Image (tube, helix red, strand yellow):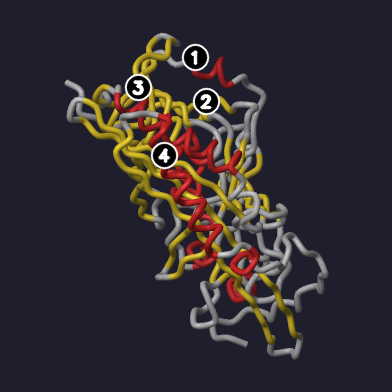
Amino acid sequence: VGDGGGTLADAPAPTNRRLYGDGDPIAGTGLPVKIDTLRAIDTFARDLDPRVVQVSAVLAASLQEVAILRPDGVQVGDIRPLTRVNVSVIVEENGRRETGTAGGGGRIGLDGLIDPADWQARTREALRIALVNLGAEPAPAGVMEVALGPGWPGILLHEAVGHGLEGDFNRKGSSAFAGLMGQQVAARGVTVLDDGTIPDRRGSISVDDEGTPGGRTVLIEDGILVGLMQDRQNARLMGVAPTGNGRRQSYAHKPMPRMTNTMMLGGDADPADIVADIRDGIWAVGFGGGQVDITNGKFVFSCTEAYRVKNGRVGAPVKGATLIGDGATALRRIRALGNDMALDPGMGNCGKDGQWVPVGVGQPTVLIDGLTVGGSAA
């Protein structure tokens, strides 16, 4: 029993569920094949367009064997494969250089990722993004409507909202959502959940790092805050059940509430209609890096692919767009949800208190009113 009071959480229910295979992705594909694949990616990208001046490709694979011995004597184990491929392409024209990146992965073997059909598609996508940005204009600045694309743009939801729904931040009162259980925190129709039970996904876990089976936790339902992500300690201190979100980077780190695959569910709007409904704003299709204060959800995110939209017409691509705001306000200003909910391709990592764990994100096309866009256009 830890300090701080509360009651001891019940022992986790046993499970034989396996959400992914236990094959070793490192040993499964020989080093010569991996090297040949990386060389083939480089050659393929350069042959696609003479403006390609640099290609970077990464194949990564790991196998984590987890053994958990609980104080009550229960032993739990898990074997977790993890793979990914990343392709980055730099193009140059008239002295201007731009970059495009694509990739994917999950708790799968490398076989699918080294299939030429797979890496060729990712290479083409990286080149497409680079060429789009090669013709991009400076992004506008101001408060405007913003449509976020499906899939990976859910990283904004993960960072600006998801961390605030982890149990420890709420128990300590440092989350923007602390004390709001049962209250409306988002626009009607918005449902957010964390789901560690999706087979083969990067953030999925058959059991968490305390032996609790991975779960599906509804966090926000139709705009109402209904749940939090919990490890065993915070669940005990808050008088609730663990949710299978007790994660740690390794045996050398302490477990804490962490996300798995965090997503916003889709609505019924046609994505094309959502973009056509924008009077003056941008359509942010791809996201890069960002900065977030996870205690209040304030964020600054850069767009890797975005387009100017006026009176429902998609115009030129824009370069240098940053989205500025806070998660709680953005949730309340959601005006439309697309019917194209998608998960990210499987490349995400999440940092918290010096620990890194693999995660997944997802969302549909989302239209937000009144988001601040930072840009350099006059």
Query: Which mark, by number, is residue 317?
Result: 3
**Mark 3 → mark 2, Cα distance in angstroms:** 23 Å
**Which residue: 50% across, 54% down?**
36
Q: Secondary structure at mark 3?
A: strand
Give the mark, 4 or 2, whose residue is nearer the N terminus: 4
Q: For residue 324, say whether it is visible.
A: no
Q: Position of residue 106 (x, y in %)?
A: 61, 54
Quadrant in the picture for residue 339: top right
**Mark 4 → mark 1, Cα distance in angstroms:** 22 Å
**Mark 1 → mark 3, Cα distance in angstroms:** 18 Å
**Which residue: 48% across, 63% down?**
169
Query: Which mark, by number, is residue 335?
Result: 2
**Mark 1 → mark 2, Cα distance in angstroms:** 10 Å
Mark closer to the observer (3, 2): 3
Q: Secondary structure at mark 1?
A: loop
**Mark 3 → mark 4, Cα distance in angstroms:** 14 Å
Q: Quadrant of the N terminus?
A: bottom right
Q: Secondary structure at mark 2?
A: strand
**Above or below 297: residue 148:** above
**Above or below 152: residue 248:** below
Give the mark, 4 or 1, whose residue is nearer the N terminus: 1
Quadrant in the picture for residue 88: top left
Query: Which mark, by number, is residue 287?
Result: 4
**Which residue: 74% across, 89% down?**
72
